[in-house]
Image (cartoon, rainbow, N blue to C red):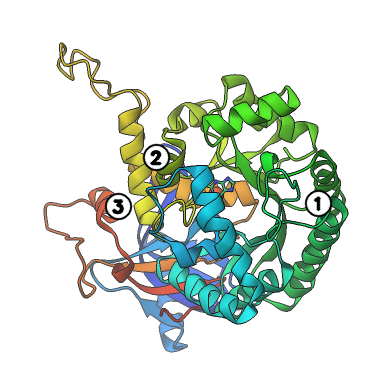
Amino acid sequence: MTFLTNCSSVIRGTAFHSTGPNSFDILEDHLFLVDEAGVLDDVISPKDDRYDNILRRSEDAGSLQRLKSQQYLLPGFIDTHVHAPQWAQVGKALDADLPVWLNDYTFPLEAAYKNTDFAETIYKDLVQTLLANGTTTAQYFGSVHNEPNKVLAEICASEGQHAYIGKVVMDLPSQCPDYYRDSSPQAALNATEDFLTYCRNLNSRTRQDIVGVVTPRFIPTCSDEVLYGLGDLARHYDAPVQSHCSEGDWEHAHVLERTGLSDTQAHLKYGLLTNKTTLAHSVYLSDSDAELYKEHGAAIAHSPLSNILFAGAVCPVKRRLEQGLSISLATDISAGYTPSMFDSMRQAILSSRLLSTGTDFSKSPIERGGIPASVIDFRQAFYMATVGGATALHVNAGQFRKGCRFDAFVFDCLASQSQTRQYDTDSLADMLQKIIFTGQRQNITALWVSGRPVSLH
Ligand code: GUN
Ligand code: FE
């Protein structure tokens, strides 16, 4: 029986969490017992015999926090694809196509982070902004140079965010500018190894996860030698891997021409398609490519905003979920223009509606078969933003279950400037849908990472 022995705080309130791609639970007026390590020690329903006793004892001990009416507890979001240095250009150059955007804007900007004062300013703002938007875990691409990557890791540690961070590898002279690339395959591998070790040491000193990630930018910018070497490092260090895969038809065709393989098959050949791999976009996958993801346990980082802006396409996530793939959600800053996972959830839902709506005006929507099978709704979006991310990164988070780390935030419908309304006609299930469609940064009024309150900037 739980008697608050190792419990440092108790939160009383109503929470929502996803229980699968098509389902969620409403934990109405439950008690959430968080232990000293920031892990949920127990979740107690009002029907539980222990409820009144625990409530009284935690109140007496001064460790009880009660959510108010119209406040809800949600799991912190897990954003699995963010380019940290691109934060400085968020919202910019979105009228360019991918090669122009990379060569004229993104590579010069990323190179500027060699100046670690610049890195410090931008990265602090980024990490604080993501936390304020409810993102308790982020998987970042850093840049080619390790000094700014280390600055990012330290800032995540000190600001209190779980972070998966990669030193970006791009070494192929024909595809990368001289001013911004790894000087040789071996230099890239040495720097990657150095950064993995740096994160491992930092991780042992912090409460959050700070994890180094093997990060080839994408196959077109990397030599065969470096790709094989990165696959070896991922295996040797049992490290996660992140990259871009089959983002646009250009990338897909380029890899096919160079290797004779699909982008997915090429990742497999280099040892980069593992059960710790997260691949952004994954739009132009064949069904057999998708089966390879499933077979090897690799995850998609679904990036609905950047897919529209740069891939000009919609990833068929419903189909991939039904195939049983692991799918997480991402903002893809700055090819995506928002730091908000609420915005990403909304775009994922809206994009799915465009996949097979069609323009056959000779038939009514009902004659066309009603809502197309490709459509996802708030359930799948909520799943991808929380449990899908936790599954991709193999962390016990994203839900309010005993043993999960307590990464969570309070969503307050009555917060200043809130656009989320609750009326007597709304059920709690309605409220989850309202929160997902209307939620904004200003609704997030408290946030915990591994049980520790984080100040919101
Ligand atoms: N492909 C290679 N690099 C990038 C990047 O930074 N953003 C996007 N969206 N695609 C890429
Ligand atoms: Fe990206």
**Residue 229 drawn at (x, y percent):** 85, 46
Tell us which disc is closer to us: 1 or 3.
1
Residues marked 3 and 2 touching at CB (< 8 Å): no
- Tag shown at residue 432: 3
174 and 102: which one is in front? 174
Q: Is residue 377 visible?
A: no
Residue type pointed to by label 2: Ile
**Residue 88 drawn at (x, y percent):** 47, 67
The numbered mark, 1 or 3, whose residue comes first in the sequence reads 1
Badge 3: residue crowd in 10 Å (few <14, some 14–19, many ≥20) = many
133 and 432: which one is in front? 133
Q: Is residue 29 above or below residue 56?
A: above
Measured Cα–Cα span from mark 1 to mark 3: 37 Å
Mark 1 highlights which residue?
238
Q: Is residue 419 visible?
A: yes
90 and 276: which one is in front? 90
Q: What residue do we see at 78% from left, 70% from top?
A: 198
> Element type at marker 2?
helix
Q: Is residue 347 above or below residue 337?
A: above
- Tag shown at residue 308: 2
Q: In the rendered picture of this protein, how many numbered marks are placed on residues?
A: 3
- Asked if disc 2 is less than 8 Å from ligand 1, the answer is no
Residue type pointed to by label 3: Leu
Tell us which disc is closer to us: 3 or 2.
2
Measured Cα–Cα span from mark 1 to mark 2: 33 Å
**Residue 266 drawn at (x, y percent):** 73, 31
> Element type at marker 1?
loop
